[in-house]
Image: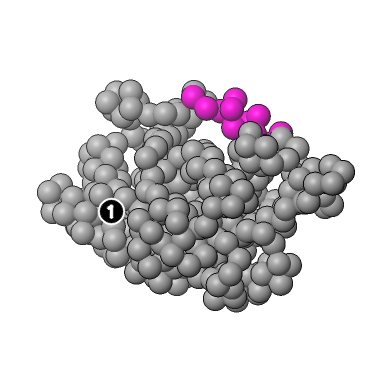
Amino acid sequence: MIGRRDFIAGLGGAAAWPLAARAQQGERVRRIGVLMPADESDPLAKIIVSAFTQALADLGWIDGCNVRMDLRWHGDDINRIRALAQELVGLQPDIILTATTPATVAVLRETRTIPIVFLSVSDPVATGIVARLDRPSGNTTGFVNLEASLGGKWLELLSEIAPGLKRAAIMFNPDTAPTSAYMPSFEAAARSLKVVPIITPVHSDAEIETAIIALGREPGGGLVVPAFQVARRASINSAAARNKVPAVYYQSAFARDGCLLSYAVDPLDLLRHAASYVDRILRGAKPGDLPVQFPTKFEMVINLKTAKALGLTVPQSILLRADEVIE
């Protein structure tokens, strides 16, 4: 790989989360609940944990010293998300960090007093998570992953790397990640590029497989994945590879695990910002006074091995813009 591999590998080797916290004498241990997607055995989970732990440590909050983490991984099972939200709130932490809209809504349903900082929520106002973006009020604030123009950006990149593109499916799970905000720019780009847009809601590995097989039956099919449970990335990548379907994804983990291309919000940058809000709230700030923030840093990852397997030549224009190239 070229780019940030060494940095990410270093994060993966950071200290594990201890089961018990050891406070310095006379210092109260603050408790942080964390509700995250994926599975704790996923290598991506280790990167997320290590990045957040390090960002907090840089601000003076040392896990096992003056803070304790109560970490839960929820996958994309709505019932499990609700159960874990109840469990975390029952622990009465000082603050809860959530990722994804379903997790944030589930925790908010359980408490209107414990501060919540969210990540990767597309539209917090429309979903009732906050009253307004500039002054959220209530007990919740955080960081959205929504940039509506990304729908068109993903399709443009896919068309650039796969010039024979004729049809493009935008695939998502409507139960956990509605993508209505991306649709206008996606459909506008499709008209401009003379590509047929295909709206593809799926709920399971079987539906993912069926949709991608259909897309790969004729040449010219492509796939855009704007938001999907990261635990499903192996299923999506595998089906896309078997059916020779070029795909662009919303998260860099997909490209590092074998997909063709990703263009996404930088997750490590997002975690650093989230840690800064957690720090401010633990030191007395009210979440309702902290504005919801939009992403400012994006990264592009290209997998040349996958491009070769698909018979594609990655244009120099894309290689020069990439933050990471996987050989």
Res 173 → quadrant: bottom left
Residue occupied by mark 1: 148
Res 167 → quadrant: bottom left
User: Is residue 87 in view from this perspective?
Assistant: no
Q: Is residue 176 left or right of residue 185?
A: right
At which x and y percent is residue 55? Answer: 61, 38
Q: Is residue 86 left or right of residue 251?
A: right
> Residue at left 30%, top 65%?
180
Q: How many marks?
A: 1
User: Is residue 296 in view from this perspective?
Assistant: yes
Camera-side residue: 285 or 223?
A: 285
Query: Could you classify mark 1 by the number of other residues whose Cα lies within 10 Å: few (under 14), some (14-19), or many (20 or more)?
Result: some
Residue 248's place in the image compared with 299, above or below, is below
Kind of element beneath mark 1: loop
Residue 4 lies within the magenta run: yes
Segment colored magenta: 3-13
> Residue at left 78%, top 51%?
28
The amino acid type, in three-letter code, at marker 1 is Ala
Residue 48's place in the image compared with 10, above or below, is below
At which x and y percent is residue 127? Answer: 39, 70
> Residue at left 59%, top 73%?
111
Q: Is residue 127 left or right of residue 44?
A: left
At which x and y percent is residue 7? Answer: 59, 27
